Image: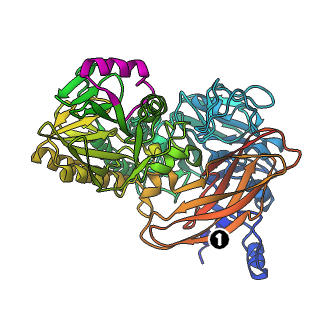
Amino acid sequence: MSGKSQNIVLLVLFSLSVLSGIPFTEKEQNKAEEDKLRFEIILPNLYRLKDACNSYLLKSGSSAILIDAGSENISGQLKEIGVTKIDWILHTHYHRDQCLGDLKLKRMGSSIAIGRLEKNMLYPVDTISPFKISGRFLLNGTLTDSTFLNSTGTLPTKFLLNGALTDRGRKMEPFEKPGVDRELADGELFNWNQYSIRVINTPGHTEGSVSYLIEVGGKLICFTGDLLMKGGYVRDLYSMQWNYLENPGIDSSLISLQKIRVFEPDCILPSHGGMIDDPNEDIRLLTIRLKEVQKSLQFERAGRWNWSGFVQVSQHVVQDCGTTSQIIIAPDGEALMFDCGSEFTLNRLDVAKKMFGIKRIAIIIPSHWHYDHVDGIPAVADAEGTKIWVWEGLAEHLEFPERFITTCRTGRSIKADRVLSEGEEFIWGGYSFRVYHNPAHMEEQMGLSALIDGLKYFFIGDGSASNKDSHVRSALHCYNGISLATGLIKTAQSFYEADPYLCLPAHSNGFATFEDTREEFMNWAVETTDAIKALLPPAHPEMGYNPYWATFYPAKIKIKPGEKVRMALRLKNCSYGKITGKFRLKSHGNLNFDNEVREYDLAPGEIKDFSFFVKSAATASPGIYIITADILYDNEMFAEFPLGYLELEK
């Protein structure tokens, strides 16, 4: 063994770090004692700890600074390398896996610094659970007055239960907030003992991410957070989608990578994965991959015929350009609506009746569960005696919205009068229809083809539209819950099978399709899918695209003080091989689990529920409590990744 190798201390398995508290056999306990030294020496005085993320420790005497803190387990390992105090934690970004150890280290005397744009993500100080209930708690995770307050009353307004500010998109900020002692600006030099650390704004993975450039042992080292991974990949695409249906993180990453390249670092140390010892090559590869995805996802819809009124597309088909609805009118005046969102009011229905001779809305079929497609259903159904027909993949989401967490969720429970199956054909009003799975926008979306007025129609809801070059394209947002393996390609295939002449999307003009149109769309779908796969880690690209591979079921539940309720952690194997792992349930609040730590295995493609009981203390205060889990998945740790919510009632 070389001298350098002798200096490298073997890393302990993730399950001995973030998954602390797991009961071990005697053999495992002995192994834990042997492997308890978990720091790896990268250079003299520079160490790496593989934990919730890669935490890097720079030592000066008995003091040190950390680049990202990972979990709180790091504090118990410091004596092994002669460190008595962490002076500073420098964060690359605010995500939970970077910050879980902050509060414990802060109480031990550490100070915290982060890029200026992300300082607010680490406030208010200390825990924010349980949340006080202000107004009516809705099943979609919001309050009627959009306000959650903790015990100090300092939590920002518009706070969603999924850990997001409504004006910033979904976030992964820590639930236990450490506060910030210093805000860091682009180009600033952070001086600590003999080291001068340059701060570089490198947005991409998040809007306010920063990197740190340090000379250590004659080598120029760059700590880049989650900007890139070894091999020229990004860990996930969904974090880069700061805005709905947009990809600003891709554009920003391309600029950030070039900023890093200019400094010519000898080595890049990322937050996840291995050390990058050829920065130029990995930056080159990632730049190519990002540009391919950027090119594929550039999309500008052709727009509307008008933005407020009704358009009669043919004698018996009306598109409401002021909402997301399409109306199919039978010869007897009965009507079938495809989508009925929050803006389709009874007053608007009266206008449509007068304009087009509609007698009654007999049937409503929603394309998917976004509020702008379903929130108008109850009022119309009550007033008209309307029956609600729902595709089988959507039915549970509409009837029990509290069981799921995702974007644009309705808080209304809508029960199906009839459940439609994929490929089902039916006749209504003298017209023939067929149901399609159309999952570009989300996994739970359907399309509906019909032969009306001698024209073959395809009602497609959201996700796909014609751009200004008359090409069919789909706008993607990962947090809607979409599959990389099937989403785009299956949607393109549905266009082939429906063979429509006229397609009516919810948010833009109808458009005609022909054989060459559909072929071009399929080619784009395949190329875009391949480009996204190439951008993500090869072992599990689906996990970097769909954030719902790990969820709690139900996602939201009510509980009384001292009561015990059953929930489940639902895990999906997104790979073609068997997956084994371990998870540990955690709570932010006064809750206890009956089976906190579990090992699991998943067959290829398997989705499995792991049930557990959670109990609230008899003395627990009313409010919203958060549960989460650290998940070891194929030897990779996902710290506090899924979220569940318990509303504790008085």
Q: Residues within 10 Å of mark 1 (few under 14, many from 20)?
A: few
Q: Which quadrant of the view contains residue 142?
A: top right
User: In this orientation, which residue lies closer to the viewer: 163 or 83?
Assistant: 163
Q: Is residue 494 magenta?
A: no
Q: Is residue 130 left or right of residue 339?
A: right
Range of magenta residues? 339-360
Q: Which of the image's four quarters has the N terminus?
A: bottom right
Q: Residue at x 67, y 26 (%)?
A: 147
User: In this orientation, which residue lies closer to the viewer: 137 or 602?
Assistant: 137
Q: Is residue 181 left or right of residue 489?
A: right
Q: Residue at x 36, y 19 (%)?
A: 350
Residue 297 location (% of width, % of height): 31, 40
Q: Check disc 1 and report its element: helix, strand or loop.
A: strand
Can residue 276 be spotted in the picture? yes
Q: Residue at x 74, y 37 (%)?
A: 178
User: In this orientation, which residue lies closer to the viewer: 470 or 154?
Assistant: 470
* Residue farthest along the right direction in this orientation: 619
Residue 599 location (% of width, % of height): 65, 70
- The residue to which callout 1 is attached is 599
Task: Give the vertical position of 302 relative to 434 (above or below).
Answer: above
Residue 566 location (% of width, % of height): 70, 58
Q: Residue at x 38, y 36 (%)?
A: 251
| Amino acid type shown at disc 1 | Glu
